[in-house]
Amino acid sequence: MQKPVGSLFAPYDPQYDPVTDEGPGINRDYAPTYWIGTAGTPPADDGPIQGDVDCDVAIIGSGYTGLSAAIHLAREHGIKATVLEANRVAWGCSTRNGGQAQISSGRLKRSQWIERWGIDVARRMHAEIAEAFDLFRDLVKDIDCEAQDGGHLYIAHKPSVMPALEKESALLNDTFGYASRILSRDEVHADFVADREAAGAMYEPDGMGIHAAKLAFGYHKLARSLGAKIHTASPVQSWETRGGVHHLHTPGGTVRARAVGLATAGYTSPDLNKLTRHRLMPILSNSVVTRPLSDAEIEACGFKARFPLTDTRTLRHYYRFMPDGRFQIGSRSAITGRDAPNAKHLDVLIDGMKRKFPALDGVQLDYSWWGWVDVSHDMMPRIFQPDREQSIFYAMGYGGNGVMYSAQAGRRMAQMIAGSGKEPDLPIFTSPLPHHGLLTPFRRLGQRMMYRWYQFNDEKR
């Protein structure tokens, strides 16, 4: 691993791969995202671990989940956590996402919840997600993160998917009492956005765009104000448990903790702990942000909606008009970290943008980046204690829908760590992240074939 030199940061590694690399590095600089480029100076932290430290709770990972856990451990349970971060604050998913909060968690729809668990469990899952959005709104209202509240539009990218959207909307209304509604192509274009691909859409009342890094930095400031310690440049390089105490060895010293919460998401190293090894399938997602658009370009694209937009592709596009007049869009990317910088993946994303908004053909891109998404093998997250004999907990597996639900997941993990017993009796809290059977590197062979199949189906008319 590369070690920091003095106060300098180790360089950003565009080819980092959590499946094959030893670890995320030490004190690496941020990915060159729009969020980092416009968030200002990151807030002060507690620096690297220096010497041996004893604490009640250690949280590994300083992203949304880990910071939420630290906030709620302090607020609700009087526990001041020690947060360990390998690189810089919120270095991973939390500063590389699309900044979109939706009323979802994982990649399954409500109808798929019913197929998997039945109506009763699905209704209670919906109540959990609705409570999560309320918590998220409550946290965000006190953080200057450029929040754009107002809903979410799930846009049909071709006419043949409209019947499925109509069925899902009816289910949301009739079974869950959730007031979604179906919009025609003309309504989408007149009132929301002139996406040329749109055949219609489903509107959900809950959705919010946020500035990803400003949100993370706001969580960070709140956690530290409540007494949490946040140590950067402190990766856990080895881990022993003796007499019920976890010895987390970092470059600067050992942290001895009575309980450990894992919040490393798509950047979870297979060597971190056997309880999380090969329990996630890290997936790369590309994102770009344009220069500020002209009034003529904004009018041509019909950007009236100021909240998240998502299309119905399996390899979906997520996009929105930004508060500063830019346009952001993201979608799937390479299979491996080594291939991530390949320009062909950027070209695919640009082509998708042009199909939706021809007026943006040739527009200057001011920011382009990619990041790893933590997809579980059954497409749903877990907040869980995988071994009742060990005080180890994890919260991860959001599948690209973690911006909102990570706040609640951190709170639920804090409840588990504190032993409050307040988490609901739901599968995401009572079962571990599934193990697919194959080691994750071998699953990538199947991923290549599935991507081709998904793309064929997505573009078939």
Image (tube, rainbow, N blue to C red):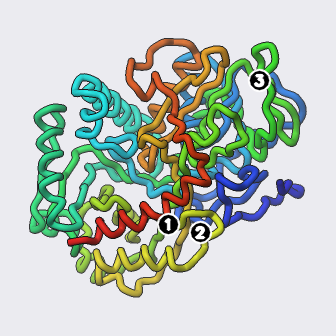
Q: Are marks 1 and 2 in contact (CB under 8 Å)?
A: yes
What's under tag 3, amino acid-wise?
His
Distance in Å between CA atoms under marks 3 and 1: 37 Å
Residue 318 appears anywhere in the view:
no
Q: Which numbered disc flags the more N-terminal residue, 3 or 1? A: 3
Quick check: 354 above or below 449?
below
Which mark, by number, is residue 246? 3
The image shows residue 63, relative to residue 386, as above or below, that is: below
Query: Which quarter of the figure is the N terminus placed in?
Result: bottom right
* 459 relative to 16 in the view: left or right: left
Marks 2/3 in contact by CB < 8 Å: the verdict is no
Quarter of the image for residue 10 reads: bottom right
- The residue at the point 60 percent across, 15 percent down is 388
Q: Is residue 248 above or below residue 270?
A: above
Percent x, y for residue 322?
38, 64
User: How far across and how far down the image is residue 261, in percent?
Assistant: 63, 29
Q: Amino acid at mark 2?
A: Ala
Q: The residue tagged with tag 1: helix, strand or loop?
A: loop
Q: Residue placed at 77% from the left, 18% from the top?
A: 245
* Secondary element at image label 3: strand
Q: Looking at the figure, which quarter contains the C terminus?
A: bottom left
| Amino acid type assigned to the residue bearing label 1 in the image | Ser
Q: Please report the residue visible at 18 percent of the width from the left and 60 percent of the height from the top.
A: 161
**Cα–Cα span, label 2 and label 3:** 36 Å
Residue visible at 61% across and 66% down in the picture: 32
Left or right side of 399 for 11: right
Mark 2 lies on residue = 340
| Residue 127, position as x, y percentages in the image | 29, 27
Residue 78 lies in what quarter of the image? Answer: top right
Nearest the eye: 419 or 55: 419
Residue marked by disc 1: 333
| Badge 2 density bin: few <14, some 14–19, many ≥20, Cα 10 Å | many
